[in-house]
Image: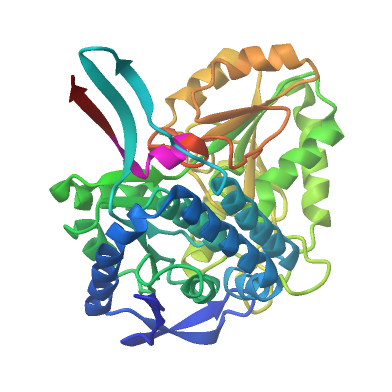
Amino acid sequence: MLINGELVEGAGSLDVVNPATGEPFITIGLASEEQAQEAIAAAKAAFPKWAALPHSDRQARLVRLADAINANSDALARALTLEQGKPLAESLGELAWVEGYIRHYATLELPGRTVRDDASALAVVRYQPLGVVAGIVAWNFPLLLAGWKIAPAILAGNAIILKPAPTTPVATLMLGALCRDIFPAGVVNIIADNNDLGPFLTNHPDIAKISFTGSTETGRRIMAGASGTLKRLTLELGGNDPAIVLDDVDVPAVAQQIFTYGFLNCGQVCLAIKRVYVHASIHDALCDELARLARDAVVGDGLEQGTTIGPIQNRLQYEKIQAFLEQARKDGTVIAGGEVLERSGYFISPAIVTDVSDGDEIVDKEQFGPILPVIRFDDLETVIGNINASPQGLGGSVWSADTERAIGVANRIQTGAIWVNQHLAIGPHLPMAGFRQSGIGVEQSEEGLKEFMQIQVLNVAR
């Protein structure tokens, strides 16, 4: 682990499982509460000097981090596939995204602005760092999410303690080794736990902000824990993203895109397509195409050439997906996939489910795995109403050959991102936020950077 500029052994240990085999492939060290306290103290001590550096110096350190990630991308990607399961090509893609996001953050500035300058007073709005930030990361994109938290936190002048998920800590700890040689001691600290140090971080009086990506249920617990000290919060939580397919689309082309963005990373993406509403006139044709794509998918070890869909990341999620499928077979029809593969590891073939509707579990709840329910509709008004009544509101998409028609529908959908004829089109320049129980605050872009800073007004009498 990285604590106060040193790579240190843990007080305990944890076997990390390769989901493609179901067996441990490495043992890592775990932080004790005392070591977590050391990381917080180191960050607190490092913060004043780091915050006082010129903004350009912090930008330059971020560029060095992006360079180091680029130089070590092969080793990081292999570790990521071993612990997370995604195909190696997707792991390399994640590394490229991390690098790109960090480089973009290194271009951002938040200069103050003068709102009054006359004979009576000078008033300037400016942004100040918060202090010590804790970043808590989910297991689906460990390095990308780490970059989303480290880069804006330290660019803003804060120091950070980052805690990866216990099922995917390895590549993030490797990232810590790179950070050690780039940032002053205490500015970046990376510790590992077995899901036991979250309350310690969220309740700690020396931590000014929690940035969390993960489930809505965990987000609620973090929000409750942070309430005692009124910490700043950014919570990017669960999504149950709908795709609305209108009756005029090119069915094979749209089916390919929906399949791609439904089953990326084995469906373990907060912004993946999780439910597809298809006009009755093309429902059967689209289902046939999706079923064909599901049958053609190559499910296997992410290190094996040709694999397009890897395993589910951990046993708990594997069991949840099987429960979803069992219920989906009762409520509807699985027309392709959904088989538990007879091999070691946590493999389930991508499933297409039909004959389901709003009110069924597979439609109403985020499955976060390789299952895609397809809902037939005749009445678009009912679809829009059901989507907007959902507790989640992270993302969604509308598909039509008539772009203006699709925009008209998109304008009525209440989600943080609403795409037209595309899905998951994200980038470091685009704010990411969620409606309702899909999150609080903003990530990415200049708006996301502001989440790591405190607005202050300097008001001088003349």
Determine the residue positioned at 34% across, 42% down.
453
State whether residue 447 is above or below residue 348.
above
State whether residue 415 is above or below residue 339.
above
Quadrant showing the C terminus: top left
Residues 21 and 167: in front is: 167
Which quarter of the figure has residue 333? Answer: top right
Residue 373 placed where, x, y %?
62, 40
Quick check: 452 left or right of 383?
Answer: left
Q: How many marks?
A: 0
Residues 375 and 261: in front is: 261
Q: Which residues are magenta?
A: 447-455
Determine the residue positioned at 34% across, 53% down.
51
Q: Residue furthest left?
A: 228
Residue 11 placed where, x, y %?
31, 87
Residue 289 placed where, x, y %?
82, 40
State whether residue 9 is above or below residue 91.
below
Queried whether the magenta region covers residue 265, the answer comes back as: no
Answer whether residue 336 is visible to the viewer in this image. Answer: yes
Residue 101 placed where, x, y %?
59, 50
Determine the residue positioned at 44% across, 59% down.
137
Queried whether the magenta region covers residue 454, the answer comes back as: yes
Colour treatment of the image: rainbow
Determine the residue positioned at 25% across, 66% down.
45
Answer whether residue 141 is visible to the viewer in this image. Answer: no
Residues 267 and 334: in front is: 267
State whether residue 11 is above or below residue 382.
below
Which quarter of the figure has residue 67? Answer: bottom right
Residues 418 and 5: in front is: 5
Quadrant showing the N terminus: bottom left
